[in-house]
Image: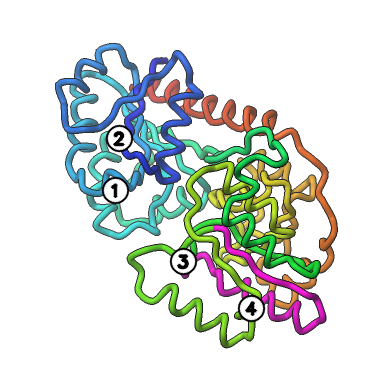
Amino acid sequence: MRYLVLRSDASTVCGVEAFTRNLASRLGARAESHVLDGRMGALAARLADTDTLIFNFPIVAWKKRLFEPFLAAALARLKGRHVTVVLHEWASLDWKRRVVLWPVLLFADGLLFSAPEVEREWRQSHFPAFGHRSTAIVPIPPNMLPSEHKEGGPEESGPAVLAIRALKAGRRTVIGQFGSIYPKKNCAELLEIARVLKDEGVDVAVAFVGSFIKGLDNVEEDFRRQVEALGLADRVMVTGYIATDEEVFAACREVDIFCYRFSEGLTARRGSVLAAALAGRTVVTNAPEDPASLDHHRLFKSLIDNGNVVICPHDADAPTMAKAVRRVIGQTPAALDMNVEVTALWASIIDRLDNVQGRSRREA
């Protein structure tokens, strides 16, 4: 099976774009990548040596390319090629984005979902049924991996690392989160958990390794107001955007414990949780609403079984989460061979992709 993976030419990549490029790389000689840039003649030439064209949605850089994915899918089908879509989100997308993607999905004879929730959202939507296509759920691997850590490297003296170290002065316990700060991530919940710990006598501070999402009204202002209201102004810091993966992991290694309380509970799409765990730190979070929703994701299950990710009840409140954090203060989870785990995860992704394509060809 020969694959052609469509990507953008963006220099700053979103999570879906990163998965796209990693997929083409992991497929090795069986795949090539092609930039969707409006040159349909060049795409037609590449399709000559291709069995299946692969789209990943939604790629941020394609927001302004409303019709090109549709034209590319139509061209592939006209040439007798298969079309597979990896759908990373659905209900969370603006309805206009879904309308634009819908025609491409209709051309697809294979559809892969990033999680059971996304598949459920698709099947419960008002768009035409997809029952006659071949489908599967694939685990989404971490988009960033730490390289071999060299103590004292240049990333160890970066501004984010130094700022978190200053926050730890006096042997404070630093709890934190990695990733962009936006309302749906419930970053404010971590502030409440920190307040509970402080009231219980724990000398705690909070570090957010990331930056505020731009374009959302009052996100940073609301965040700062809550910090002040909880009396945590001298105990909370936000690193801001960090350019390289190694600087990110260096900053994450300065945090003692990561903690997330998600409205929907942990899902297999939470790359921020994977990154924090890969940094060698314990992550405390609340359980998925459906415990089976992680069954397809070997890495998450290994991290939970190994104690890298500590699971609280789905509806855990701030005091319950704070209690779980207190239990793991000073503990370091046993090391996992992340290279083995991530390699196995990609093998399962490729296996499911091949199986979907095999079914599509038999049903054609």
Position of residue 58 measured from the top left corner of the image (x, y, whole percent) = 35, 46
Per the rendered image, the range of residues in magenta is: 183-209
The amino acid type, in three-letter code, at marker 4 is Asp
Q: Which numbered mark, 3 or 4, is in the foreground of this view?
A: 4
Locate residue 230 relative to residue 61 in the image: left or right.
right
Q: What residue would you read off at disc 1? A: 128
What residue would you read off at disc 4?
A: 234
Label 1: which secondary element: loop
User: Circle 2 is placed at which residue position?
Assistant: 9
Q: Label 3 is placed on what type of residue?
A: Tyr
Q: Earlier in the sequence, mark 2 or mark 1?
A: 2
Callout 1 amino acid: Pro
Relative height, residue 306 to residue 36 (above, below): below
Mark 1, residues whose alpha carbon is within 10 Å: few (<14), some, or many (≥20)?
A: few
Picture quadrant where residue 301 is located:
top right
177 magenta-colored:
no
Please say if the residues under marks 2 and 4 sit with CB atoms less than 8 Å apart: no
Residue in view at x 46 percent, y 52 percent: 120
CA distance for labels 3 and 2: 26 Å
Mark 3 neighbour class, 10 Å CA radius: few under 14, some 14 to 19, many 20 or more = some
